[in-house]
Image (tube, rainbow, N blue to C red):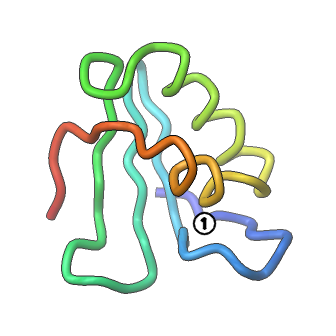
């Protein structure tokens, strides 16, 4: 996983992993901290947007909070 840059300093996302058709997101706190979102669960456009925001280091947590994309699994 890659560390999320968190340019705003307010994100709960700490790391992510981009893959072909998925993104894994590690959150700083909560009972479930690792979520996997896939093209099947969240939709291709959402996954592409999430991957771009993760790399950019800004707006990623806000996107997840606002759009609440469905996840494939969590642990």
Q: Which residue is mark 1?
A: 3
19 over 32 or under it: above or below:
above
- 65 or 22: which is nearer to us? 65
Q: Is residue 24 left or right of residue 15?
A: left
- What is the secondary structure assignment of the residue under circle 1? strand
Residue at the image position 57 percent from the left and 50 percent from the top = 66
Q: Residues within 10 Å of mark 1 (few under 14, many from 20)?
A: some
Q: Looking at this rendering, what residue extends furthest in the front direction?
A: 66
Residue at the image position 29 percent from the left and 63 percent from the top = 34
- 57 or 30: which is nearer to us? 30
- 16 or 13: which is nearer to us? 13
Within the image, what quadrant is residue 51 found in? top right
Residue at the image position 71 percent from the left and 42 percent from the top = 53
Within the image, what quadrant is residue 62 found in? bottom right
* Image x and y of residue 36, in percent: 29, 45
43 over 67 or under it: above or below:
above
Residue at the image position 29 percent from the left and 54 percent from the top = 35
71 over 38 or under it: above or below:
below
Q: Is residue 44 left or right of residue 51?
A: left
Give the total of numbered labels. Answer: 1
* Image x and y of residue 19, in percent: 43, 29
47 over 31 or under it: above or below:
above
* Image x and y of residue 13, in percent: 54, 68
Quarter of the rendering occupied by the C terminus: bottom left
């Amino acid at each position: 996983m890659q560390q999320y840059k968190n340019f705003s300093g307010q994100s709960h996302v700490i790391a992510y992993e981009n893959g072909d058709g998925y993104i894994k997101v590690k959150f700083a706190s909560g009972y479930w901290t690792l979520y996997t979102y896939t093209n099947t669960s969240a939709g291709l456009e959402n996954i592409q947007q999430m991957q771009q925001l993760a790399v950019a280091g800004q707006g990623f947590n806000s996107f997840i909070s606002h759009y609440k994309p469905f996840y494939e699994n969590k642990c």
